[in-house]
Image (tube, grey):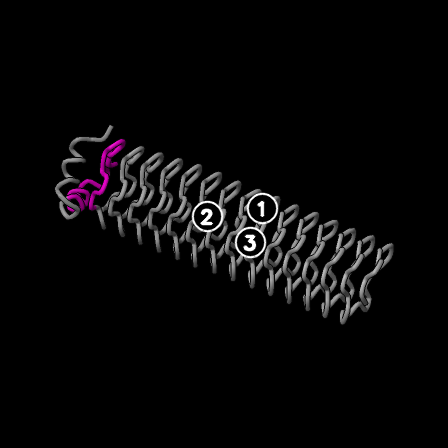
Amino acid sequence: MANRKHLTVLKMGVEAWNAWRAKQREIRPDFSLANLAEASLSGALLDHANLHGAKLEQADLERTDLRGADLNGADLRQANLNGAVLSNATLCGADLRQATLSEADLYRAALNWANVRGANLSRASLNGADFRDANLQGILLRGADVQEGNLMGTDLRKADLEGTCLRRAKLIVANLSEVNLSGADLREAQLMGADLTGANLSETNLSRADLRGTDLRGANLSRADLSDARLVRANLAGAKLQEALLCGVDLSCSDLRRGDFTRADLYLADLSGTDLSGANLRGADLRGADFSGAQLQETDLRGTNLSGAVLSETTLQEARV
């Protein structure tokens, strides 16, 4: 339960609270289970405070210092956390639906099992944040920094991550169907087993990313950088990869049926054992590519450069060359 004295001082206003807190730095404020819904706490010094299970629905926490605070299970629906400092805070199981956290600092914050559906985290700093098993459906993360973030098993369906930095982030088995990742930085990211069906990955940087076993059916990867990426046994049926950079990529044993690789760069790519039936490879750079054991029935290879390509045991029935 909340400390009554702490609540009394806080209700006197932010200025009075901050003045009291400045003299009581050794005390950890306790507002656990407190009802602070719609409270005006902008700029308050609440670092390391105990707000476990607190009701903060529609509260104004803009630019509030919540470093290291315990917000586990807190109700922060529609709260204003723009510019707030939440580095190293714990928000496990918290309800952040429709909250605004634009430009907030969530460095290494823990948001496991949190419900962040529909929240606005545009331009937020989420470097090293832990979102494992969180619900992030439809969130706005444009321009945010999520480098080395842990998003394993998260639900990001229809989220907007345009221009987001996710370098070296963990997105293993995450649900990213219909997500907008246009222009995002996913270099060296781990996306094994992720669902990216219908995702927009145009002009996205996925160089050296691990996409083994991912589902990319119908995804838009036009002009994306996938150089040296690993896509073993991935499903890219019907995907759009026009002018994509795929040099050195490992696509072995992948489903590439009806994929559009027009003018794509597949120099030294590993396409062994792939199914490219009905795919469009017109004008692609296929120099040194390995097509051994690949299925190329009805594949359009017109205008391609196949110099040095390996075509042993390749099926080229009705292929257009």
> Which residue lies at the image location 13% right of the left edge and 45% below the top edge?
16
Residue 216 relative to residue 92: left or right: right
Residue 292 location, quadrant: bottom right
Q: Which residues are magenta?
A: 17-40
The image shows residue 88, relative to residue 52, as above or below, that is below
Q: Position of residue 312 (x, y in %)?
A: 86, 57
**Residue pushed farthest bottom?**
303
Q: Residue 128 has which mark?
A: 2
How many marks overall?
3
Residue 245 relative to residue 124: left or right: right
Secondary structure of the residue carrying tag 1 is: loop
Residue 92 location, quadrant: top left
| Spatial CA span between label 2 and label 1 | 22 Å
What residue type is disc 3 on? Ala
- For the residue carrying disc 3, how many other residues have a C-alpha within 10 Å: few (<14), some (14-19), or many (20+)? many
Dot placed on the residue nearer the N-terminal end, 3 or 2:
2
Residue 129 relative to residue 48: left or right: right
Q: Position of residue 188 (x, y in %)?
A: 58, 54
Q: Is residue 28 magenta?
A: yes
Secondary structure of the residue carrying tag 3 is: loop
> Which residue lies at the image location 63% right of the left edge and 47% below the top edge?
214
Per the image, the residue denoted by label 1 is 195
> Which residue lies at the image location 72% right of the left edge and 67% below the top edge?
284
User: In this orientation, which residue lies closer to the viewer: 46 or 78?
Assistant: 78
Q: Position of residue 271 (x, y in %)?
A: 75, 56
Per the image, the residue denoted by label 3 is 199
User: In this orientation, which residue lies closer to the viewer: 154 or 297?
Assistant: 297
The image shows residue 64, relative to residue 310, as above or below, that is above
User: Which is more foreground, mark 3 or mark 2?
Assistant: 3
What residue type is disc 1 on? Asp
